[in-house]
Image: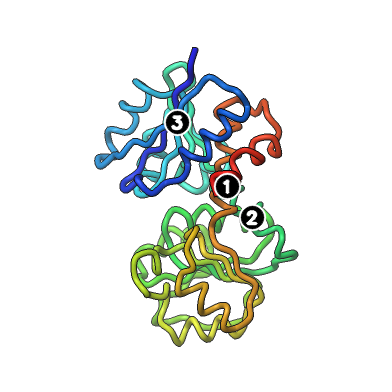
Amino acid sequence: MSKKFTIFGNPVEHSISPKMHTFAIEGLKLDASYTKTHLEDGSKLKEIFLANFDGANVTVPHKEIAFSSCDEVRGIAQNIGAVNTLINEDGKMVGYNTDAEGFYKSIQTFGTIQNALILGAGGTSKAISFIFRENGIDTTILNRSAQRLESFQKENFKTYTHENFQSSPFDLIVNTTSAGLETKAYPAPEEIMKDIFSNTKYIIDVIYNKETPFLSLAKNYNLPTKDGSNMLLYQGVLAFNLFYQNQFSFEEIEKFMKKAF
């Protein structure tokens, strides 16, 4: 029977997940389809998902509500409190988070990372902070407002707002905010950006297919940079394999999904 997959989001028009998954479906000669579902009301996600789909991906702003709507949550997603991958198991909605592992795989080319500064305190920041902790990377979170930092403080992460930030050397700076997606903004005030860039080794922005002001500034400091394309690719490969009970190798799926970039 033909399998049906989708991605839920608002907005979702820009997502290249359907392209990635369709290349994999066609390349592996599977009977399936992958569509986009624009969803404004996250409370309807479970009902729509279970009635129509075998598996799904979830993007902003629905990762947290997807987590709380699941019948079961597995793996690191339990700590993160956000899911980006859903499986329909006999009418039960089961959630996973492949963002964390996908991101961690994407920074392997940088070499050894001992400590990192994450800009932003949303769902992606949570995913990255927990996978860093799991791999022994000392992690600090910097966010504009104090309120969003409370959940990180409960987990004993070091946190700062723009007002009380104290700079120190970091191996890696990660931007998880949407700054630079639509505007020329930086994720933090320019004086903080210049301070941290003069004291780091590597830079990554989770925004993909776009040179953000954050990445442009990093290049002025001759720092190795990456955008979020690899993270997106790798989380997609991991999600696809969950759709198919891990019956393929990572490399098999990656080979086809890569074509979307």
Whichever of labels 1 and 2 marks the residue nearer the N terminus, that label is 2
Query: Which residue position is annotated with label 1?
Result: 233
Who's the residue at 62% across and 75% down the image?
Answer: 170
Q: Is residue 131 above or below residue 221?
A: above
Within 10 angstroms of label 2, few (less than 14), some, or many (20 or more) residues? many
Q: Amino acid at mark 3?
A: Tyr
Q: Position of residue 88 (x, y in %)?
A: 46, 23
Res. 74 mark: none
Res. 34 mark: 3
Front-lying residue, 212 or 66? 212
Who's the residue at 69% across and 59% down the image?
Answer: 136
**Tag 2 and tag 3, C-beta contact below 8 Å:** no
Left-right relation of 36 to 94: left
Name of the residue lying farthest toward the left: 41
- Cα separation between marks 2 and 3: 24 Å
Q: Amino acid at mark 1?
A: Leu
Q: Position of residue 113 (x, y in %)?
A: 70, 66
Q: Is residue 255 above or below residue 217?
A: above
Front-lying residue, 24 or 218? 24
